[in-house]
Amino acid sequence: MGVGGDLQNYIGKAENMTLYEAQKGSSYCIKGVYVEPAVTRRLEALGLNDGTIVNVLNRKKAGALIIRVRGTRLALGKHISSNIEVGVHREENEHES
């Protein structure tokens, strides 16, 4: 039946969001960077590639987001962070309860 597949599809979509929607203090995995090509190249040079884990450190009132990526703190504006798709990062070493 299609209900299970629809539910699984919904759950998969619910786990993806933009970096701008991310919560302070959480870790996320980069799924895609969808900004201008020159900006994308610069972000990749700074370490923001697909599969990279980022930690959200702080959120400023004007919309800027402070993140940690590969040991470096970066500030991203709303335009950039709202065009970076992320998924919630789950530790591979988590033990089942």
Image: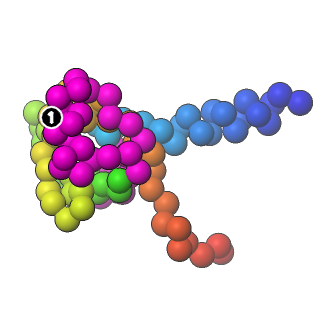
Q: Is residue 47 magenta?
A: yes
**Residue drawn at the location 65% of the way across and 73% of the way down:** 96
Residue 29 in the image: above or below residue 8: below
Residue 55: which quarter of the image? bottom left
- In the image, taking residue 96 as reference, residue 6 lies left or right, namely right
Measuring from the top left, give residue 59's x and y in whole percent.
18, 45
Between residue 61 and residue 38, name the one nearer to us.
Answer: 38
**Quadrant where the N terminus is found in the figure:** top right
Query: Is residue 76 visible in the rendered structure shown here?
Result: yes
Residue 25 in the image: above or below residue 62: below
**Residue drawn at the location 32% of the way across and 40% of the way down:** 19
Between residue 34 and residue 78, name the one nearer to us.
Answer: 34
Q: Residues within 10 Å of mark 1 (few under 14, many from 20)?
A: some
Q: Identify residue for label 1.
A: 77
- In the image, taking residue 21 as reference, residue 78 lies left or right, namely left
How many labels, in total? 1
Measuring from the top left, give residue 92's x and y in whole percent.
53, 68
**Quadrant where the C terminus is found in the figure:** bottom right
Between residue 13 and residue 59, name the one nearer to us.
Answer: 13
Question: Helix, strand or loop at disc 1?
Answer: loop
Q: Amino acid at mark 1?
A: Gly
- For the rendered model, the colour scheme is rainbow
Query: Is residue 78 visible in the rendered structure shown here?
Result: no
**Residue drawn at the location 24% of the way across and 44% of the way down:** 44
- In the image, taking residue 80 as reference, residue 30 lies left or right, namely right
Magenta segment: 22-51
Measuring from the top left, give residue 6's x and y in whole percent.
73, 30
**Residue drawn at the location 70% of the way across and 38% of the way down:** 8
Measuring from the top left, give residue 43's x and y in whole percent.
20, 41
